[in-house]
Image (spheres, grey):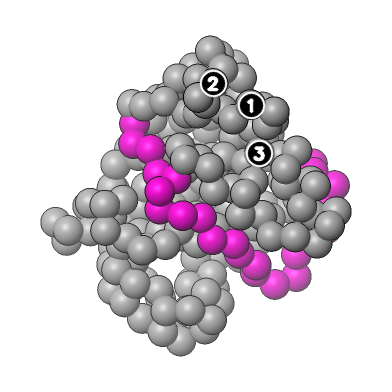
Amino acid sequence: MASVRNFTQFGRKIVAIGRNFSEHARELGNAVPTAPFFFLKPTSSYVCSPGKIEIPRGCTVHHEVELGVVVGKTGRNIRQEDAWNHVAGYALGLDLTARNLQDEAKKKGLPWSTAKGFDTFTPIGAFIPGSSIADPHNVRLWVEVGGQMRQNGLTNAMIFQIPQLIEHISGIMTLEEGDLVLTGTPKGVGPIEPGEHVVAGLEYEGQELSRIEFDAVERN
């Protein structure tokens, strides 16, 4: 378990679930999915709190606050009923998106790797042991930018819950110890500008289990 606490240092991939909250899908004009889908982010995009978020020139960068699931046991073709045996714990994360680049890619039918993969585009909090969150589908996630609340939602609004996500992903690729699964974002995504201060939190049963803070700067 000690090594899993350092998942950002040895985990091999970040698997990010798209449009797993229906209101978020609708706010961007997307159809609500009928099956899970995901994209990959490089682990080089991790930045730990407190830190700096780099905003590339010419990019409209949006915040997406998410519950991350830290894989604690390697597995392939994992059944939903066995999924919890592969979960070590959780982490609060932000999936940053260069929205203008993503919109271009979507129009051309191209992958989202550029829009999602810049350095510092996965701000991340400390490892939270699984025992601290008995029901990860009852977690409150929020983010403030410049002191204004932007996102504030509960994970009970997920379309596809964590066991189904683990079954789906592991039926395609092996989930390895230290991997992170980002489970989707509630509504309220919006832009971050250089000079702004970003704060996000994760609460369970009225207790704040994680808070992360970042200053947005222009990428050199």
In the rendered view, does 68 fall on the left or right side of 19?
left
Mark 1–mark 3 Cα distance, whole angstroms, equals: 10 Å
Q: Are marks 1 and 3 in contact (CB under 8 Å)?
A: no
Tag 2: Cα neighbours inside 10 Å, few (<14), some, or many (≥20)? few
- In the picture of the structure, the residue carrying the numbered disc 2 is 218
- In the picture of the structure, the residue carrying the numbered disc 3 is 98
Q: Closer to us: mark 1 or mark 3?
A: 1
Identify residue type, mark 1: Arg
Residue 220 visible, this angle = yes
Magenta residue check for 168: no
Mark 2–mark 3 Cα distance, whole angstroms, equals: 13 Å
Label disc, if present, on residue 137 of the rendered structure: none
Identify residue type, mark 2: Glu
Residue 32 visible, this angle = no
Mark 2–mark 1 Cα distance, whole angstroms, equals: 7 Å
Q: Residue at x 22, y 52 (%)?
A: 5
Highlighted range, magenta? 27-49
